[in-house]
Image (tube, coloured by chain):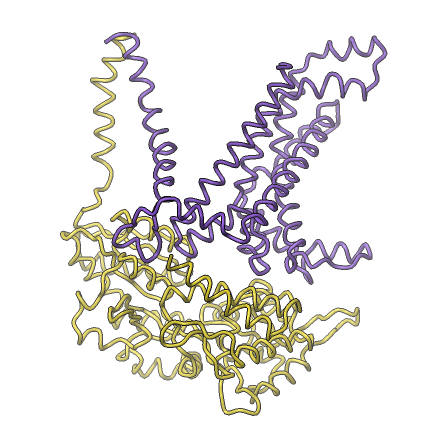
Chain colours: A purple, B yellow
Amino acid sequence: MSRRTVAWWFLLPSALVLGAVVAWPFVYNFWISLTDLGLYTIRDGAHFIGIQQYLRVFAEPDLYRYLLRTLVWTLLNVFFHVLIGVSIALILNRPLRGRSLYRALLILPWALPQYIAALSWRGMFNYEFGSINLLLAKLHFSPIPWLSTEVGAFAAALITNIWLGFPFMMVVALGGLQSIPREMYEAAEIDGAGAWWQLRKITLPLLRPVMMPAIVLGTIWTFNNLNVMWLVTNQGEPGDSSHILVTYVYKAAFNYYRYGYAAAFSVLIFLILLGLTWINYRQASRSTYGA
Amino acid sequence: MRGHFLRFHRWIGWPLVLGLISCAPTSDDPHRLSIWEQMEPAEQRLLHEHLQQFETEHPGVQVDVVHFETENLRNNYQTAALARTGPDLVYGPSDHVGPFSIMGLIEPLENVFSADSLALFLEDAKPSLEGHVLRLADQVGNHLTLVLNRKYVDHVPVDTEDFLEIARSNTVDENGDGKTDRYGIVFNLTEPFWLVPWLGGYGGWVMDENSKPTLDTPAMREALSFVRRLVDEGVIPPSCDYPLADTLFKQGSAAMTINGPWSWESYREQGIDIELALLPRIAGRDSWPQPMTSSKGYSLNRWIPPARHPLAVELLAFLTSARVVGRISEELGTLPSRSDVSQWPRLQANPTLHSSWAQLVKGRLMPVVPEMRVLWDVMRPGLQHVISGRLSPEEAARSMQQSALRKIEELRK
């Protein structure tokens, strides 16, 4: 057996696993999207119907509303994840008493199961008895109907997801900050550069290569984050008005058994994410390598 | 390097893989049965005791139980059974069995039980679709009743006006801080399951005999108006969902609640002195609210290997036998699914079962057709919009009907 053959044998298990858990489901999903698979056809086998499911998806009156809401949801979440994560990392990267304790505490939201965190936040957003409105009342503000209005439910899910997501960016940013050579700051100080200048000209440019993959990952995770929106808004309440694309697709597939339609919708979501990731990577390589 | 790899591959690698495969249970082991369920903890405890008994009576047989939350059970069973695997028995509520039957995932039970055996079960306990019996229940009911906290309420409301009067007199600000400390009534305002009894009381129902939705009716408008009136009068918190209602009642911060058999024991455990009562008659009419009734029980997987099929049928017969159903009823206070058990004197003397039975006979069986899922989904936003004041009952009823027709059409595409 040649060395090359041995190498292929070592690669084979990973290739098989990737083929089984990534490639095959993707191809199968695409196939389903071209069929009429649903509650009444699943028993006797689905029929090939071409691109009809895709036409149904584009004819869906709420598609563009859900798409816009998903984009706003993703943008705001990733923006606040990075802003809060990097800000806290900058603070924790300085000499600080009790730094390890703060780090451990700030990672807690990330360590909690999303399911439990989302349901706890839902309880805290209750109009009469939730701790958030009780706190607002103590501060002499009017209570906010978080879960009974479209904007309120969206804001509630957003706050929950920001709380859950910033520790990841914080950890990544902390790792990046610790890899920046100390000498660069010392040289800048000798040249009379202030803290703001150092942040803009040393810290942020050197953090960018570390943060960009995290931002791409964060974008994909947030865009496809079913749990938080589904649980905080209790399946899109009030009145199916707080769906993002993935919650809508989940409901179509698993509540209404519209498998063909949901598969076509999933392909559309995949293409949107592929586009967003491609744009992100192009931007990242341009800003990193000046290409 | 190459030599090491080959030695590993020949003497350790493959035997290891083969050993692991041979240790895994085979899916057609004729002595190993499995059940997937979504039971409450008390039900689970009894199930395990009964299974121990079954295993003792059948040496060499093992029954594995896997617990799921209700929706996960539906999704996972569907996925497994579509792949022709999954458990031998699946235990859950009635509304799962319609879709399971249409998708061909469960075996019609008239194929495996005699007509005489099936005749021992109450109608509610053997939901059927297109003439096929889809499930055998170990308990029936699952219906809502009025639950009174006897510390605050000294009589059963005669009708809805009396009910409102009791609720008003029990909605109090005890410490004078301008906030309500005790509510007259609490129940889940976000789920249409709690709206349906009033819909039935005003003479309506969710669908006709052809499974066509009947939501835009005067009865629906009156039912929505009644629930809205409770909110307007301030006798119920406007954001009252299930956890809140449950917590307030258990804390003694509510005089009445509306809830099902799964909750009664937990109220007693919290030290609340409860009395079960009929949902009050609609004032000015001779009609009673009609809570939806259903059952919980076992269906048989359509894809059980032939070698294990007789044992799976035997297990199903055991878990729905008179001794098991009777014990569940005695221990959990649920209504028995069998007519022979319902005649047991000690069950007939039980006041909880008596009250529950009185409410059950005023209820109406939940349809098991898949369209029911759509109706829940369209009634939910309508109800919530009426509670929040965004839609009038007229607008909500119209919107429910339109959405229902559209979604049922989509369901069939």
**x and y percentages locating residue B207 in the rendered image:** 42, 74
**x and y percentages locating residue B198 in the rendered image:** 52, 79
Do we see residue B209 in this rendering?
yes
Q: Quadrant of the N terminus of chain B?
A: top left
A49 or B290, which lies in front? A49
Q: Quadrant of the C terminus of chain B?
A: bottom left
Q: Which quarter of the figure has residue A82?
A: top right
Q: How many marks?
A: 0
Residue most extreme to the left: B307
B383 is higher (above) or lower (below) than B217: above
Q: Which quarter of the figure has residue B69?
A: bottom left
**x and y percentages locating residue A218 in the rendered image:** 58, 33
Q: Which quarter of the figure has residue B74?
A: bottom left
A60 is higher (above) or lower (below) than A172: below
Do we see residue B278 in this rendering?
no
A107 or B175, which lies in front? A107
A61 is higher (above) or lower (below) than A171: below
Give the side of residue B166 with respect to residue A1, left or right: right
**x and y percentages locating residue A100 in the rendered image:** 67, 28
Give the side of residue A213 with respect to residue B80, left or right: right
Residue visible at 16% across and 71% down? B114
